[in-house]
Amino acid sequence: MPFAATALIIDDDAAVRGLIRAEFEADSVRVEEAENCAAARARLDDDPPSVVFLDLQLPDGSGMDLLPELVTRWPDVPVVMVTGYGSVDSAVQAMQLGAFTYLEKPFHEGELTAVLKNALRTGRLLERADRESSEFGFDTVLADSDAMRAVVENARAAAESPASTILLLGESGTGKGLLARAIHAASSRASEPFLTLTCSAIPEHLLEANLFGHEKGAFTDAKESRKGVFEAAHNGTVLLDEVGDMPLPLQSKLLGVLEDRVYTRIGSHEERTFDVRIIAATHRNLEEQTAHGEFREDLLYRLNVVPLVIPALRERQADILPLAMSFVHRFNAEFGRGVEGFAPAAEEKLKGYGWPGNVRELRNVVERAMLFVDKPLLEADDLTLASGYHPGGSKPAPAPEAPASADAPITLPEGGLNLEDVENELIRQAMERTGGVKAHAAALLGLTRDQIRTRLKKLEGG
């Protein structure tokens, strides 16, 4: 039977340990046992369990003395104090020292399972908050330029504030999504869901259903009831990406929901409340859209509580090389390369380009180079830029007349390459990036499903 979690039971009473084991293993929780402090301390160097049940009275010491060691070594593992009648005050004191909660002996029916489930949920939320902080925190937002440092400083303040709405503005590819994740990870909502809804290229009725949810039969394809993002992300954060593309009728509904914090699912009359932070992001000029009647002025005021404008990459020159190096490190790990950096001419090429696609374009340029190059330093010729590249400029220039090969997506290395090996490598990466979903991998490579099946069969030697 596969186990979903591990519980460590520290108790000198074998009967109690057996009772807990029987109940927990029925819930697919693996149980480990320690009969005293010494056995528990011997377990500290191993992988942490999901939860600990710690008896207050042990034969070679007090659980109160062991508790600080557990909390220090395993800070994300909930510890449940187990106490006999008459020692509740000590258990409460233990909670002040970091215990999750306490249980009195003898246990009531269902009490063990209820406490276990609450403790496991808390532990998972703590782990997720730590993971969110490390993977998506502000440390992942490179800001060597003064302009970007100011944005990050203001974003940190916004994350820690009670602001219910934040507006991220900036050109496509500047990193609005990354900054939104960092704000969530640094907020008090970090352990709760972060959900993204892109408002462009979705039919209006589906966009509304994704926002507010729908009941079964509310429209033709509504074969079952579904939660919207406001309901699914309760207590967390919702990123409304490309909010400037939201249809006007839906803008009106969104404004009402943001004002009252009440919504109804499509096909229902039941009002539901929600508590989420809304981060809206767009590359459009919302003030111009408002002037042209394309965006509601009152919704703009409602979203624009904390505006953060992310500068274009051409306006933050000091960030170009650090960002490029961060992508080198990423693709070294992903592709198994050993690139150390850029030759001086390559650095000048990167700094002299206008980056109309911003950070996203820079990432693609580095990725493309490293797909086909494995040497200590990337040279200028290894970097394929759009035809707007011009040395020493800060903005993209008009595209000059050039042969068709100037816009080629890759550059043939001077020493040549094995085309079959390149194709196999790209197919492998596409399958890895899409989790083995052939249809998605085919879309990344511009192939049909039948074409990628044929190539996979050939790759696997079938």
Image (cartoon, rainbow, N blue to C red):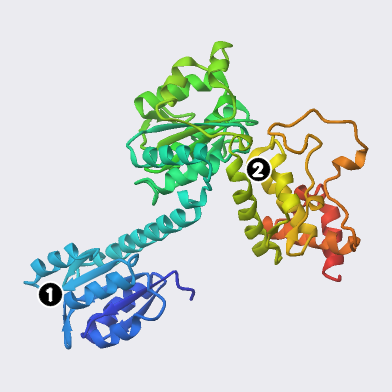
Please say whether residue 228 is visible from this viewpoint: no
- In the foreground, 223 or 356: 356
Q: Nearer the viewer, mark 2 or mark 1?
A: 2
Q: Which residue in the rendered view is the most extreme toward the left?
A: 86
On screen, residue 391 above or below 340: above
Q: In the rendered image, which residue does mark 1 sit on? A: 84
Q: Residues within 10 Å of mark 2 (few under 14, many from 20)?
A: some
Which quadrant is home to the C terminus? bottom right
> What residue do we see at 48% from left, 29% from top?
267
> Within the image, what quadrant is residue 437 found in?
bottom right
Point out the residue furthest to the right here: 403
For label 1, count other residues whose C-alpha is less than 10 Å away and answer few (under 14), some (14-19) or many (20+).
Answer: some
The one of 4 and 127 positioned closer to us in this rendering: 127
Give the amino acid type for the residue marked by disc 1 in the picture: Gly
Amino acid found under the numbered disc labelled 2: Arg
Return the mark for residue 360: 2
Query: Would you place residue 247 above or below residue 365 in this image?
Result: above
